[in-house]
Image: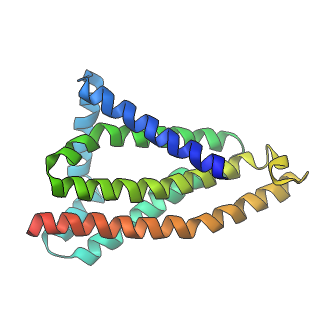
């Protein structure tokens, strides 16, 4: 599992750097993608609700919604559950990882450069949330590979390997939850203070 965690972390870093580089090189389709991402964040749910909570001073609601969306959609649905499809699920998780890392690489440099406070909020959020997604993606890939490569678990039965992979995933999800809770608290508290400071 350690190798898988390292591979996923490297995929995030590499795709982030590619997104950052193409943005700084002013590649047109990347700049259009950046505008589209900004429009979605400012005009779609759950972002509108979170921004509304922050503007009304409802910090706890903003934290809860951010955590729930990041845990259910960001971690569970997009990077772990695809693993239920043997082998193909691993590719789905890798694609999600690369797209997410690239998208963050496209959008985050502006956030990090805006101010020292914005840098602190953005970097803390980046580390905590992507850290959680590294664990959830590794769990999803591991689940997808287990029935295809049961010998990784020193068993012959594909079903036994799949069960072992789910046990491994269950052991990783408390880490995912803690990182995402900390990420939501960090991000929403920072944004709240920036809005009301």
The extreme front residue here reads 116
- The x and y percentages for residue 29 are 29, 24
Drawn side of residue 141 relative to residue 13, left or right: right
Residue pictured at 27% horizontal, 22% vertical = 27
Drawn side of residue 180 relative to residue 116, left or right: right
Residue pictured at 27% horizontal, 54% vertical = 122
Q: Is residue 12 above or below residue 182?
A: above
Q: Is residue 93 above or below residue 59?
A: above
**Image quadrant where one finds the C terminus:** bottom left
Drawn side of residue 152 relative to residue 108, left or right: right
Q: Nearer the viewer, residue 36 or 22?
A: 22
- The x and y percentages for residue 70 are 41, 60
Q: Is residue 82 visible?
A: no
Q: Is residue 187 visible?
A: yes
Q: How is the image coloured?
A: rainbow
- The x and y percentages for residue 99 are 44, 38
Q: Is residue 118 above or below residue 191?
A: above
**Quadrant of the rendered image containing residue 135:** bottom right
Residue pictured at 31% horizontal, 26% vertical = 22
The extreme left residue here reads 197
- The x and y percentages for residue 45 are 29, 57
> What count of labels does the image hold?
0
Residue pictured at 73% horizontal, 58% vertical = 165
């Amino acid at each position: 599992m350690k190798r898988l965690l390292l591979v996923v972390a490297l995929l995030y870093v590499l795709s982030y750097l590619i997104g950052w580089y193409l943005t700084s090189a002013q590649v047109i389709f990347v700049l259009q993608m950046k505008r589209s991402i900004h429009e979605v964040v400012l005009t779609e749910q759950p972002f509108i609700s979170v921004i509304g909570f922050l503007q009304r001073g409802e910090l706890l609601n903003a934290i809860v919604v951010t955590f729930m969306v990041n845990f259910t959609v960001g971690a569970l649905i997009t990077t772990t559950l695809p693993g239920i499809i043997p082998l193909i699920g691993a590719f789905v998780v890798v694609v999600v990882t690369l797209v997410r890392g690239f998208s963050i690489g496209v959008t985050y440099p502006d956030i990090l450069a805006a101010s020292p406070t914005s840098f602190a909020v953005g970097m803390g959020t980046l580390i905590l949330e992507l850290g959680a997604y590294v664990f959830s993606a590794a769990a999803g890939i591991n689940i997808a590979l287990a029935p295809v490569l049961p010998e990784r678990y020193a068993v012959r039965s594909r079903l036994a390997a799949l069960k072992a992979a789910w046990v491994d995933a269950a052991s990783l999800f408390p880490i995912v939850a803690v990182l995402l809770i900390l990420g939501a608290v960090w991000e929403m508290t920072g944004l709240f203070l920036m809005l009301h400071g």
